[in-house]
Structures are given as structure tokens and as C-alpha cells.
Amino acid sequence: VVFQVIGILHPLGATPWGQDQDDVLYVPFTTGSLRLTGQRHLRSATVAVAEVAHIDRTQTDIETLLIARHGLEDFRIRNMAAIIETASETQRTMTLLLGIVGVISLVVGGIGVMNIMLVSVTERTREIGIRMATGARTRNILQQFLIEALVVTALGGAIGVAFGLGTTAAVAAFGTPVVYALFPVVLAFGCAFAIGLIFGYLPARKAARLDPVVALASE
């Protein structure tokens, strides 16, 4: 059967259930039923509403009409609003789960930073004692170890951001569209600094409260 192309539709993309609407040919119903499929009945129909608020009422009217004509409910109706709501709910759930995983990862990373700093304080007890004996104040020791903790977490944040940007660039190289935004980068560094301050405070306070005499006597 030879057909004549009389027009091209603008791009529509995929349907919510994955069907590509840009790879479809449209022919008159009578022509398709007589010359292509041999079927004289519709397999599906698409109904558009002028107002989103009328979707539920329109669905009810369609169900009533089809049951009256068929005598039984031998059809299925896909409500786009319900599909979108389900997809949105799924996305919210995934976002929540990813957020929980992120928080757990931050806490675990923070505990690791705290342990490293505690070991550092223990190994540098004599150094801390010498600094105190030569005039360093409590706040100077506190600032020193807080800055060291911030440097560690900032390096971790920089490595994470670099890895994320590299992965994004690799994905973009395969033709997948990506969007770069400044907020996630700022958030990553903000979380890194917050973790450094929170989990670095305990080791820094421990170092600042050391007795200079005891610290100098340690090996």
C-alpha cells in the first residue's frame, strides 16, 4: 500500500508508559482498518480535556458511556493525572531515600574524620605541650586542629565534586543531555565544612585542654 505524506507533526517525545510518539505514522481510521489491520474496531482512544480539574469527571463519564455501550467493563482507562501523581510520589520517595543515604554517609565520614584527628592529637601530644609552653593559648590549639579538620573535609569535598563533574562529563560524551548547576557544588562544600567543624571540634577541644606538664612528659 502506497501512502502520501501530507504533513509532519512537531516532536512529542515519549508517553508516560514509554512509547515513542515521534516514531509513529498516522493514517485515516477507515484506511488503516480496511487495508492494514483488517480490524473495524478501535484498540485505543485518546481524550484531551480543556481543564485539568475536569479529568476525574471526564473519566467517570467515559466509563459510564463505555459500560452502557459494551454491557460490561472490558476496557482500561489510563488517567494521566494519576500517572503523573504516581511518578511524582515515586520521585519524592527516591529523593527521601537518597537523602537518608547521604546523611548516613556524611555521619560515617564525619566519624572517620574525628577518629583520624583523635589519633593525630594522641600522636602529637608532646608537640602540643611544647606549643603551650612557648605561649600558645587554648584557643590557638583549638583553632589549629579545627583548621586541620576543615582542610581534610575540604579536600574530600573537592575530590567528590571533581569525581561528580567527571562522571557527568563522561555521561554527556555519550550524547545524554546533562545540566550543570552551582547549587549542588556549593552544598557539597558546605556539608564538607559543616562536617569538619562538627566532628573536628571534639579532637580540637581535647587537644586544647591538655595539661602542658603532662603533654611535655609524654613520649
Image (spheres, rainbow, N blue to C red):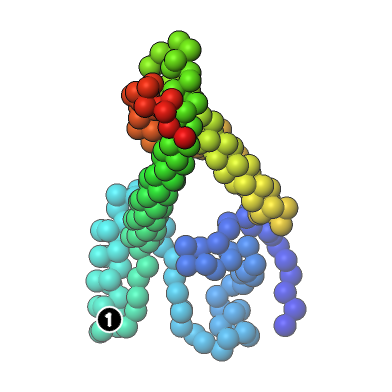
Q: Position of residue 100 (x, y in %)?
A: 35, 50
Within 10 angstroms of label 1, few (less than 14), some, or many (20 or more) residues?
few
Q: Is 78 situated above or below 145? A: below
Disc 1: which residue: 73
Among the 4 quarters of the image, the one containing residue 24: bottom right
Q: Is 50 situated above or below 3? A: above
Judged from the image, the secondary structure of the residue bearing numbered disc 1 is loop
Among the 4 quarters of the image, the one containing residue 86: bottom left
At 48% from the left and 18% from the top, the residue drawn is 131
- Number of numbered tags placed on the structure image: 1
Q: Position of residue 27 (x, y in %)?
A: 62, 72
On screen, residue 7 versus residue 139, left or right, reads right
In the depicted view, which residue is nearer to us: 81 or 196? 196
At 25% from the left and 65% from the top, the residue drawn is 60
In the depicted view, which residue is nearer to us: 102 or 137? 137
In the depicted view, which residue is nearer to us: 29 or 116? 116
On screen, residue 25 versus residue 123, left or right, reads right
Q: Is 43 situated above or below 169? A: below
At 43% from the left and 17% from the top, the residue drawn is 132
Label 1 sits on what residue type?
Answer: Glu
At 72% from the left and 83% from the top, the residue drawn is 1
Q: Position of residue 186 (x, y in %)?
A: 51, 31
Among the 4 quarters of the image, the one containing residue 19: bottom right
